[in-house]
Image (spheres, rainbow, N blue to C red):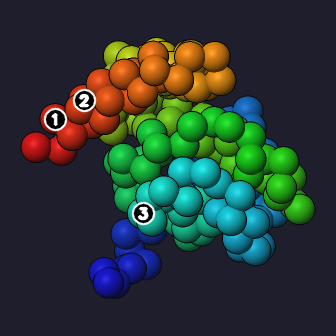
């Protein structure tokens, strides 16, 4: 585990996030973990932890948060949003963090736009796969095999 040095922290980071639409309630978080428990991404990726991201923002870990690939893992599903007892709206906090990451040059704007298109494509793929699963199992099996092959090729 890496030490956190106070000289590396930005105490105004939380205020910068708070100034973005959707970030208004970030300072209300008391780290209950409900967001992480509800998150489908956290369920399949141990490195993705909404509570940790919020804590890092509140601590002022600007560089670590804005340069993290975890910003782009959130699928914007509203599960955390619906469960948060403090109305922190983590989904919208992620939008604010993504905008700050682009604004401050941690990622290129075209990459952020491409990720939005990718998310839309993945949602359509999920919809189409679910329809096939219900209506045409052989076509679903063929689609699943192709998707699995694509995923396997990405890992090699």
Residue 121 in the image: state x and y as whole percent: 48, 16
Would you identify the image quadrant in which residue 85 lies? bottom right
Q: Which residue is drawn at 45% across and 16% down?
A: 139
110 horizontally vs 25: left or right: left
Q: Against 113, is 43 above or below?
A: below
Give the percent coordinates (x, y) of residue 6. Answer: 43, 78
Q: What is the number of the mark on residue 62?
A: none
Front-lying residue, 48 or 109: 48
Q: Mark 3 points at which residue?
A: 47
Q: How many marks?
A: 3
> Extreme front residue here?
138
Do the numbered discs 3 and 2 sit on residues whose CB atoms are within 8 Å? no
Is there a contact, CB below 8 Å, between mark 2 and mark 1?
yes
- The CA span between labels 3 and 2 is 23 Å
Number of residues whose C-alpha sits closer than 10 Å to that of mark 1, classed few (under 14), some (14–19) or many (20 or more): few
Kindly identify which numbered label has been placed on residue 150. 2
Is 88 or 120 nearer to us in this picture? 120
Q: Residue 153 carries which label?
A: 1
SS for callout 3: loop
Left or right of 130 in this view: 63: left
Alpha-carbon span between mark 3 and mark 1: 22 Å
Tell me: residue 116, above or below residue 68. Answer: above
Left-right relation of 38 to 43: right
Quarter residue 83 falls in: bottom right
First-in-chain label (3 vs 1): 3
Q: Residue at position x 32%, y 84% from top?
A: 1
Determine whether, in the image, residue 50 is placed left or right of residue 146. right
Q: Describe the element under mark 2 as helix, strand or loop.
A: helix
Q: Is residue 117 visible?
A: yes
Residue at the (59%, 42%) spot, across then down = 94
- The image position of residue 102, as x and y in percent, is 42, 30
């Amino acid at each position: 585990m890496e030490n956190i040095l106070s000289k590396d922290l930005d105490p105004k980071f939380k205020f910068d996030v708070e100034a973005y639409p959707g970030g208004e309630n970030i300072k209300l978080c008391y780290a209950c973990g409900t967001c992480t428990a509800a998150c489908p991404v956290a369920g399949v990726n141990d490195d993705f932890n909404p509570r940790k991201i919020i804590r890092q923002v509140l601590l002022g870990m600007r560089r670590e948060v804005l340069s993290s690939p975890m910003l782009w893992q959130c699928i914007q599903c509203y599960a955390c949003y619906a469960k948060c007892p403090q109305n922190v709206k983590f989904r919208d906090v992620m939008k604010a963090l993504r905008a700050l990451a682009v604004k401050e040059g941690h990622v290129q704007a075209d990459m952020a736009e491409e990720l939005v298109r990718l998310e839309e494509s993945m949602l359509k793929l999920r919809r189409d796969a679910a329809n096939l699963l219900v209506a045409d199992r052989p076509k679903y099996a063929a689609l699943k095999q192709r998707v699995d092959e694509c995923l396997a090729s990405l890992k090699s």
